[in-house]
């Protein structure tokens, strides 16, 4: 019997997906460049139909035709290396699936290469980490639709169960699946930063201990604000350090790393002209955090106010919860807006309601409010920004004062809140009918004759500013 599905790359994600697929009664062949990982997978196999292989040619030969092969290798050059080894071994009609966090533009290039060889290709964003891969991830696919149709039964079987079915979706041609996953990660960065700012405000601003902060977050996580990231934060804040007996979070170096998907999301937003400042600030916040040594030096040279908030804890908690809700929705709103713009620009043609549905379970940014976001996009598929629609509009009405308080208090106390602050700036800009950009246009025209438009009549205008009459 030939294996129905093949996986190349058996690090933890690859192993867990192999087990998940095999546990749903699809036979899987596995291959990894170094045999140890293949053996590690086999050590975890009980009676699942998994076939280990130790050479690429052997792997290809044990797969049922047309073949379906999932690559779970590190994004970037390793994907191209595996593909160049694999291409000569495949036959027209075989399907390649890249399940890593590849850049969507790389996926578009690889699709063209696969097409020229008569192969089918899918770029699939897989979210949910190691646990998700084993128990039910969210899958965001793009590329050849015939390829998706072929593996859809497997994807449906292994995906997390979300609203109205499994969390797998086909989002269109080209790199659409990886684009959706990239923006998912951008939103992930923003949410993590917003939660980190809440933690800092409660810790340094009010002097709360990690379990006290956990109690606040656990309460928020009871209702409409429930989310995976907030839930794991509660666990993290309650975890003891076995070495010191203190709280583990306080023993961890405050320098965040990144593999680049948040940066790509921001770069792609800039390319599109899509406004995602909260996501961008979260990327920059990680960059600044990584300058640990420099910050330690600057702390001595650039003193600021005592980082204490001048507010009773009860009042701050109420404001912070509302500010958190508003910032959270704005992070999703910016991500969805970017997806909408990308869909038109790249011709993906996907529905934001379907993106929201696929994100309701399995993925890292899963949250109760995604179901409500889905409904908003079902009602209004071209909604330009989520906060314009109910019930999110209500969050603005009820929470804008709180967001202003939080940002003001934090700034006065010298506690950085880049995500909160940029959220407020973004929303204030977005709801301002007349911004000062008229002056910027005048400046551009003054020094560069770039022309400007007028409010009172159409056309492009230029003024010889140096000669113009002045008061
Ligand atoms: C997921 C995660 C996953 C991973 C990112 C984080 O959806 O399962 O987003 O893809 O955690 O690679 O990457 P950073 O290293 O950039 O934080």
Image (tube, rainbow, N blue to C red):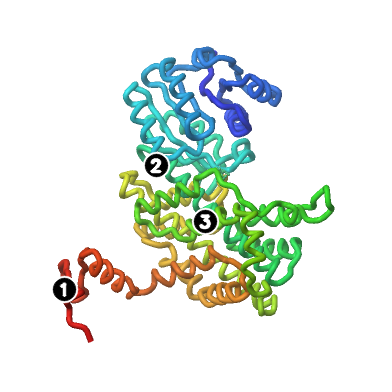
Q: Nearer the viewer, residue 302 or 160?
A: 302
How packed mark 2 is, by other alpha carbons closer than 10 Å (few <14, some 14-19, many 20 or more), is many
Residue 103 in the image, given as x and y percentages of width and height: 44, 40
Mark 3 to mark 2: distance in Å? 25 Å
Task: First in sequence, mark 1 or 2: give its number.
Answer: 2
Q: Which residue does the numbered mark 3 point to in the structure image? A: 284
Q: Quadrant of residue 289?
A: bottom right
How packed mark 3 is, by other alpha carbons closer than 10 Å (few <14, some 14-19, many 20 or more), is some
Taking the image as shown, residue 468 lies to the left or right of residue 29, namely left
Q: Residue at x 36, y 49 (%)?
A: 342
Q: Quadrant of residue 11?
A: top right
Locate the C terminus by quadrant: bottom left
Q: How many marks?
A: 3
Taking the image as shown, residue 245 lies to the left or right of residue 75, namely right
Q: Which residue does the numbered mark 1 point to in the structure image? A: 457
Q: Which residue does the numbered mark 2 point to in the structure image? A: 176
Mark 1 to mark 2: distance in Å? 40 Å
Taking the image as shown, residue 156 lies to the left or right of residue 377, namely right
Q: Nearer the viewer, residue 364 or 449?
A: 449
Q: Is residue 267 above or below residue 277?
A: above
Residue 207 in the image, given as x and y percentages of width and height: 73, 70
């Amino acid at each position: 019997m030939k294996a129905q599905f093949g996986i190349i790359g058996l690090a933890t994600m690859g192993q867990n997906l192999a087990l998940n697929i095999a546990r749903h009664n699809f036979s899987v062949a596995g291959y990894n460049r170094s045999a140890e990982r293949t053996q590690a997978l086999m050590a975890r196999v009980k009676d699942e139909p998994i076939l280990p292989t130790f050479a690429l040619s052997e792997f290809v030969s044990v797969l049922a035709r047309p073949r379906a092969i999932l690559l779970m290798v590190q994004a970037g050059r390793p994907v191209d290396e595996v593909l160049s080894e694999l291409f000569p071994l495949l036959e027209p009609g075989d399907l390649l699936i890249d399940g890593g966090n590849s850049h969507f533009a790389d996926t578009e290039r690889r699709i063209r290469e696969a097409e020229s060889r008569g192969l089918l290709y899918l770029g699939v964003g897989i979210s949910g980490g190691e646990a998700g891969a084993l128990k039910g991830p969210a899958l965001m696919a793009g590329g050849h639709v015939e390829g998706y149709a072929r593996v859809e039964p497997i994807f449906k079987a292994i995906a997390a169960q979300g609203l109205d079915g499994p969390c797998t979706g086909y989002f269109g041609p080209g790199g659409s699946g990886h684009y959706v996953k990239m923006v998912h990660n951008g939103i992930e960065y923003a949410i993590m930063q917003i939660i980190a700012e809440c933690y800092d405000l409660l810790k340094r601003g009010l002097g709360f201990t990690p379990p006290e902060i956990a109690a606040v977050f656990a309460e928020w996580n009871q209702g409409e604000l429930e989310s995976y990231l907030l839930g794991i934060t509660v666990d993290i804040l309650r975890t003891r350090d076995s070495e010191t007996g203190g709280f583990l979070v306080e023993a961890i170096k405050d320098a965040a790393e990144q593999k680049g998907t948040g940066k790509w999301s921001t770069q792609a937003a800039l390319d599109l002209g899509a406004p995602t400042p909260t996501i961008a600030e979260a990327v920059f916040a990680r960059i600044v955090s990584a300058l640990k040594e420099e910050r330690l030096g600057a702390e001595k040279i650039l003193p600021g106010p005592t980082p204490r908030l001048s507010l009773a804890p009860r009042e701050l908690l109420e404001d912070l919860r509302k500010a958190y809700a508003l910032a959270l929705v704005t992070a999703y709103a910016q991500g969805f807006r970017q997806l909408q713009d990308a869909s038109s620009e790249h011709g993906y043609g996907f529905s934001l309601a379907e993106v929201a549905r696929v994100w309701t379970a399995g993925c890292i940014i899963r949250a109760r409010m995604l179901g409500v976001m889905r409904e908003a996009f079902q009602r209004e598929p071209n909604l330009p920004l989520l906060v314009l629609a109910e019930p999110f509009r209500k969050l603005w009405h009820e929470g804008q004062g709180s967001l202003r308080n939080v940002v003001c208090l934090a700034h006065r106390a010298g506690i950085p809140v880049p995500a909160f602050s940029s959220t407020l700036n973004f929303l204030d800009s977005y709801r301002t009918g007349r911004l000062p950009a008229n002056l910027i246009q005048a400046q551009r025209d003054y020094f560069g004759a770039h022309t400007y438009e007028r409010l009172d009549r159409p056309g492009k205008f230029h003024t010889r500013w140096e000669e113009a009459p002045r008061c």
